[in-house]
Image: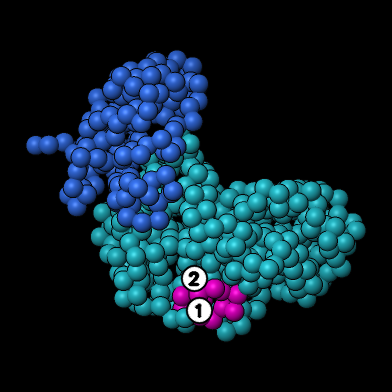
Amino acid sequence: MDTHRKPVPIVNPWARPFWDATRENRLCIQRCKDCNSHVFYPRIACPHCFSDGLEWVEASGKGTLYTFTVVESNAPSAFIQDMPYVVAIVKLAEGVQILSNVVDCDPNELRCDMPVEVTFEKLNDEFTLPKFKPVKD
Amino acid sequence: MSQLKGKVAIVGIGEVPTGRFPETAAIYHAIESAKQAIRDAGIDKDEIDFCMPTASLFSPQFNTELVTCRVVEELGLKNCKKNCQVFAGGSSSSCGLQMAGSLITSGAARTVLFVHADRLGTGVTAQGGIDLFSTAGISAEWEVPFGQHYSSIAALSTTRYKYETGCTDEHLASVCVSNRKWAELNPNAFFRKPLTIEEVMASKMLSTPLRSKMSNMLFDGGSAFVLTSSERAKDLPNKPVYILGESGVVSHFVFSQEPDVSRFGWAKAAKEAFEEAGLTPQDMDVAEIYDSYPVYQMIGFEELGFCKRGEAGEVFMRGDTWPGGRIPCTTDGGMLSKGHIGAGGAVSLMVEAARQLMQKAGERQVKDARFAVETATGGTYMDAQVTVLGTEIP
């Protein structure tokens, strides 16, 4: 697959640990030391209690498919070659939501609220994207 | 609560047709709409003391012209004290109306010209439009790298809405049919040929379950309105269209951070807006619900309280929202049939609400309409803005 034209994440400095972790095939999110909330995407202060006490923790990588779609036409230029591809919002076990793609699946078998787990796809030497796949029984 | 109830009124409206006009300069859509609105208001142009253009997306150069007073100069507005852009994406209509109303009630302005124009039909290519809307308002770190764009966003809402309510694809298509019935009666609409559920269902799949005829299309166009104090409005020829209630909820920037992509903040915003107005959804003669895609019009319609959750599909299908129906909805044809002109999608809905209440909607006039509600949302459905308008102050 030709990936060099793909848009890479424009990284905010405080989110760098997230992308450093995905490069090592780990999914890390923030947790607030004061109110114990998990936080995603990375913030400079807790969006719940406004504390500065955010720490990085490794997420379980498990979640459910909150919603999804199969892109079959009219994709952005860099993704035309990938069609059909699945865009989805995954609700992680930690309670936060993340947008990603569902891979290694038959799109016809996807259902809302089905269990999914993280997998990793290397984009280039700098970026690895967290993707999700259905949990096999 | 806007604190504006009954204090300010839309007194003039203007609009150019929505379509593809490659030979027409973008500024024409702004100044022609503004000229019509000022003449419609029956005021001297030099009464405008505040010009409030909202943003154009197709060209930074053109938008800079709007920011740097071109409308004021082109129209020769001699007593204009300020030209200041107010922009909230698709919710610029409601946000602009509230800002303008607040300026008037504070005494900072007397008569405000709000104007929108864009050229998304001929100013960008078709793929350019898709690419623009795969980055504009979409997180460059958390969503763009996954191929997110506006069709996939609408599809994500639609999938969840269908899952939670049992809504069918035919229900979605019936929203497109309802809007088309109004567009057939609107000379400013782009799509005016009758549309059937079967035609929508046979159109190309974009992002499941969203088909091409369930998607808005981008066009050139513009619209404008003039807002002044209710006191000044009494002396003017049009029936004043008063702001009766207004509220909003901002819910997200990154679409996937929205906790409920099949509800959003509409219920809270609507409750507050109706409370301020002292009215209920049942009092509304017209519901100008922001569409852009059918699912958002259904969600807005239900969350505002026009029917129970999950029932909108049947309501749209059986014709309650059509011309002559019990609750006329999105009576200019909306972005699905009139055409999407950027931030102006809701500005033209606001203008349509005022037009209906002024009894100037021609063939599609809702008889004796006194009260209307208009909704707007910007970005990736980042907010829920609700405005209640009327020609009487309850």
> Which residue has dot 2 on it?
B337
Q: Residue A73's quadrant in the figure? A: bottom left
Tell me if I can see residue B344 in this picture.
no
Amino acid type at circle 2 is: Ser
| Label 1–label 2 contact, CB within 8 A | yes
- Residue stretch in magenta: B180-192
In the rendered structure, which disc, 1 or 2, sits on the residue that comes first in sequence?
1
Chain under callout 1 = B
How would you rate the neighbour count of disc 1 (Cα within 10 Å): few for under 14, some for 14-19, many for 20 or more?
some
In the figure, the shade used to draw chain A is: blue
Amino acid type at circle 1 is: Arg
Q: Residue B122's quadrant in the figure? A: bottom right
Helix, strand, or loop for circle 1? loop
Helix, strand, or loop for circle 2? helix
Chain under callout 2 = B
Is residue A33 shown above or below B376?
A: above
Q: The cyan chain is which one?
A: B
Q: Nearer the viewer, residue A60 or B329?
A: A60
Q: How far apart are marks 1 and 2 (CA)?
A: 7 Å
Indicate left or right for B135 with B151 as reference: right
Is residue B115 shown above or below B260?
A: below
Task: Determine the residue positioned at 71% across, 74% down.
Answer: B239
Q: Any mark on residue B192, and which?
A: 1
Task: Determine the residue positioned at 63% across, 72% down.
Answer: B17
Whole-percent x and y of residue B204? 34, 65
Indicate left or right for A79 with B333 as reference: left
How would you rate the neighbour count of disc 2 (Cα within 10 Å): few for under 14, some for 14-19, many for 20 or more?
many
Whole-percent x and y of residue A21? 34, 19
Indicate left or right for B366 with A127 as reference: right
